[in-house]
Every structure is written in C-alpha cells, then in structure tokens.
Image (tube, rainbow, N blue to C red):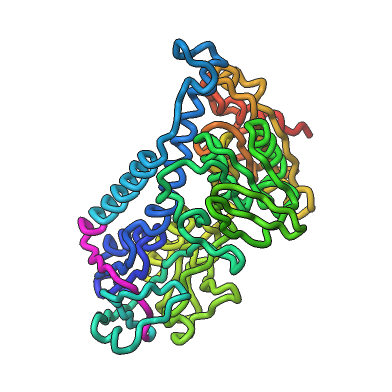
C-alpha cells in the first residue's frame, strides 16, 4: 500500500497510538488520531507518568532519612530531618507535569501534520470510523451507551485504509469493592487526594500495587499490602521479589501474604477490608490494584469481525494485525504485554506493515521492563523459571551488590545482578538487576541479548571504576566456561 495514498485513523492517543501516528505521517499517510481523554492516554495522564513522579517524590524524601547514615544532617533534626510530604502540592505538581507531557505530545503530532480529534471513536464497518465528538455519556461499561439519535447529532465519519485501535485499559474493580473516589480508590483516583492517608491498605501485590505501596510508605504513610500469593510480585524473579519484600518489611510495611481480599466497605472515616479467611483489616483508605480491563466494549469490533479473547482483549499477531484486513491493534487493549514501550513498538510495527515499510515482527524476548520500587527491579530475556524448568538450556550467576565499591559509597545495601548464558555457546540470554536505577543498568544487558553477545564479548568491554555496571561485567566473567 502506498503511504502517499493512504488514510490512517488511530483510535486512542496513548503510546500505542501517538507513537504509530508519527511514522505514519512520515511515510506520507493522511493521519487522524481520535482521543477522548487527552493525548498520552492513561500512561501519561493517570498511570505511568504520574505514578513514577509520585515514586520519585518518595525517593527524594528517602534521601533525607538516609542522610544520617552517611554523616549528613540538619542541625537539630534526627532521623527523617523533619521532612514532610504535602500531598496536595505533590499531586498538583504531578498532574501539571502529566498535562505538560500531554501538551508536548500534541505539539509533536500537529507539527508532523497529524489531525487530532477529541472524541470517542468506534468502528462502523471495516474502513469507516465514527467519532462521537460531544457525547455526555461516559462509555465505561456501566452507563448506557449513547442512543442512535445522540450519535447522529455529534458524529463525524472518517474513511480509512488503515485503522489502528489503541484504546488501552482501565482499572479492574470488584463488585465487593466499589471505588467511591474518596477512601476506596483505584490507581487513577489517588491523585485527587489532598492529605496523606493515615493508613493505606493496598490490595494487590503485582507491579502497580508494589510500586504505589512503596511510594506511600516513602511519603510517610503507614501501609499494609494485601497479597493473595505467597510473595509480592508473583510474576517476577523470585530472588528479586524476596529482596523487595524484605526491604518492605524492614521499613515498616505490613505485608499480608496468602491473604485474598473478599471485599472493601466504608465505615465512617475508615475502610474495612475483609479477607476471605474472615480476618478484617482497617485503615483510612484502600487502594485497589487488582488488574485491568481492556477498553474494547461498544466499539463495533465484534460487529466488524474482529476477534476478541474471553477477557475482551483484541487478538493480534506479531505484526499487530487483527482478524480483519486493514484493522490493527496495539497496547494494553491487546493484552500482549502491558508496557508503554511494547505498546509503542506494536503501534510502529503495525504502521510499517500496513504501509509497506521494512518491518520485523514483535520479539518479546528482547523487551526490558522495570519495577520502580526501591530498589528497582529490571529484567530482560529469559527468566530463572525458564532455566529451572528446563525450557531453556542455560546457567546463571547471581552477584550481590554488597561487594561493589560504588554501592558501598552510595550506602546501597540491597540488590544483585543476575545473568543467564546458554550452555555451550555462552550467549547471554537474559538478566535481572535489583539496584537503584536498575532501569538504566538493564540497558547493556538488553543490548547483549538483542545482539546475541557471549559472556566473553560482554565482559571484555571496559566499564568505569568504580561503577555499578562493573558488577554486570563481573557477573559475565563468572559465566565464562572453560572447555
């Protein structure tokens, strides 16, 4: 398909949408982005950017409490140096930052010649997108959908050679734990808080739950983390999760393992979380972090012939095609891997494939991810579970950071580097980093995985002394095999 003759309509302005629109415009297509909330989507406005900004604030505060351990302090203050979080100001800054990022994305799209329409898009038929530009109903799955008469008054019809659906996902809620926006909250509602919760109960110990539990603990809030599994972060490296849980407990967090929440109710100025075994946990606020639901309802997908999974996710192949020619999908609405980086890559791959540009299918084996706790946990490639189960013929080495000179200088007491190398070829297949700024340290390992470097090539590359990256090279040296 010639980009010069193509009309591309992107439904959703998050990473999967706007990152696709830019190369589409570069390839000469006529591009329209339809977004009803704001450019950047939930990732920028209510999820990734705000949560990481909140975590950065908590980490900044932690530096004051840790200062005394390295001989630094303010006269007349001990421990936390008298530092307090003013949550209203913190949240105001976070939301202004998110809006500024959204505005930057809009400016980039407009500069590239992309048309941006504020409204709710749905597929009327293959090749036709209807955009409701002024509908008062919020189509969240609970309110009734707009009537045909309402749609006709405020609907714009767009023809498209290529349709990309990138509508993301929203927080999953429980029938027994209905958010009220005041004391029972989803992760999108916490930025409306004006005062720090006296005691926050976080329900769910996946990535979102662990990150926000860490953030509020760092801001000075008493935190209880309710985990239905044996440990926090059940889907992550077990060694890394164990380190993080130990750190949580040592800093005063109450972690309730094997404790599934049955319901949450208000009781005056408190919330009561009832566990399935009958126990009750009381706090001032409850935060629900129990997964997400794709935004695919009432979009005309099934009527157009697009195949959805039982969970409502759009089924796509490795070049982001759906079951209908000319309709692609990217991001959290596909359920492939809920990362902004993956959504963006899916969107770019979709456009390249649709417009005839060079393209390589999505390779999840090269995706690096990070959990923004303290310490951070970053991973790429194969996992310890892959090796232990025999799915991958590899060996591993885990090197604690306690012996790293830079770690000692920075008073880093928790963390490690773990590398996996294939038996025989010594090719680096993956790694785990648990450390401050692990999100930065994982990059050289990701390069090694993507370029199939072996441990000798990796370890023979110079590192700065002293540096945290020195431990990564040392781990590679320890994986050197002698035949």
Q: The N terminus is located in which quarter?
A: bottom left
Q: Residue at x 58, y 63 (%)?
A: 177
Locate residue 28, reporting x and y percent: 25, 66
* Residue 162 is inside the magenta segment: no
* Residue 111 is inside the magenta segment: yes
The magenta segment:
109-124
What is the residue that sits farthest to the front in this orientation? 268
Residue 304 visible, this orientation: yes
What is the residue that sits farthest to the bottom in this orientation? 149
Q: Above or below — where is 349 with respect to 246?
A: below
Q: Residue at x 56, y 35 (%)?
A: 374
Q: Quadrant of residue 453?
A: top right
Locate residue 214, reporting x and y percent: 56, 40
Q: Which one is nearer the viewer's eye here, 34 or 281?
A: 281
Locate residue 421, reporting x and y percent: 69, 41
Locate residue 479, reporting x and y percent: 71, 33
Q: Quadrant of residue 310?
A: bottom right
Q: Above or below — where is 259 with respect to 434?
A: below
Instruction: Tell me: 226 left or right of 300.
Output: right
Q: Residue at x 54, y 31 (%)?
A: 436
């Amino acid at each position: 398909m010639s980009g010069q003759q193509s009309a591309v309509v992107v439904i959703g302005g998050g990473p999967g949408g706007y990152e696709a629109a830019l190369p589409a415009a570069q390839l000469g297509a006529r591009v329209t982005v339809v977004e009803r909330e704001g450019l950047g989507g939930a990732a920028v406005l209510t999820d990734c950017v705000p949560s990481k900004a909140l975590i950065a604030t908590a980490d900044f505060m932690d530096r004051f409490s840790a200062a005394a351990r390295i001989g630094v302090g303010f006269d007349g203050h001990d421990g936390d140096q008298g530092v307090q979080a003013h949550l209203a100001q913190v949240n105001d800054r976070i939301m202004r930052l998110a809006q500024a990022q959204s505005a930057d994305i809009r400016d980039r799209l407009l500069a590239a010649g992309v048309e941006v329409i504020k409204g709710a898009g749905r597929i009327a038929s293959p090749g036709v997108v209807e955009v409701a530009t002024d509908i008062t109903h919020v189509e969240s799955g609970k309110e009734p959908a707009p009537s045909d008469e309402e749609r006709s008054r405020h609907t714009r019809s767009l023809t498209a050679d290529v349709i990309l659906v990138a509508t993301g996902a929203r927080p999953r809620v429980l029938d027994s734990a209905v958010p009220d926006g005041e004391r029972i909250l989803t992760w999108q509602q916490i930025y409306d808080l004006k005062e720090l919760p006296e005691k926050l109960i976080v329900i769910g110990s996946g990535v979102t739950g662990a990150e926000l539990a860490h953030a509020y603990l760092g801001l000075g809030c008493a935190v209880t983390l309710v985990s239905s599994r044996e440990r926090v972060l059940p889907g992550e490296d077990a060694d890394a999760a164990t380190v993080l849980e130990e750190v949580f407990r040592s800093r005063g967090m109450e972690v309730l393992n094997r404790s599934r929440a049955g319901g949450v109710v208000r009781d005056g100025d408190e919330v009561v979380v009832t566990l399935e075994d009958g126990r009750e946990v009381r706090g001032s606020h409850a935060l629900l972090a129990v997964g997400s639901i794709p935004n695919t309802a009432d979009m005309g997908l099934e009527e157009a012939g697009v195949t959805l999974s039982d969970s409502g996710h759009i089924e796509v192949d490795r070049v982001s095609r759906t079951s209908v020619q000319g309709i692609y999908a990217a991001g959290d609405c596909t359920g492939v891997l809920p990362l902004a980086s993956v959504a963006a890559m899916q969107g770019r791959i979709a456009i390249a494939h649709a417009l005839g540009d060079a393209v390589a299918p999505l390779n999840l084996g090269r995706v690096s991810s990070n959990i923004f706790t303290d310490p951070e946990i970053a991973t790429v490639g194969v996992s310890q579970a892959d090796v232990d189960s025999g799915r991958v013929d590899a060996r591993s080495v885990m090197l604690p950071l306690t012996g790293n000179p830079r770690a000692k200088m920075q008073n880093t007491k928790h963390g490690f580097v773990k590398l996996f190398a294939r038996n025989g070829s010594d090719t680096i297949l993956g790694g785990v980093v648990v450390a401050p700024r692990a999100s930065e340290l994982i990059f050289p390992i990701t390069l090694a995985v993507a370029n199939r470097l072996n441990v000798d090539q990796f370890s023979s590359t110079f590192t700065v002394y002293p540096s945290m990256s020195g431990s990564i090279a040392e781990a590679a040296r320890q994986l050197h095999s002698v035949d």
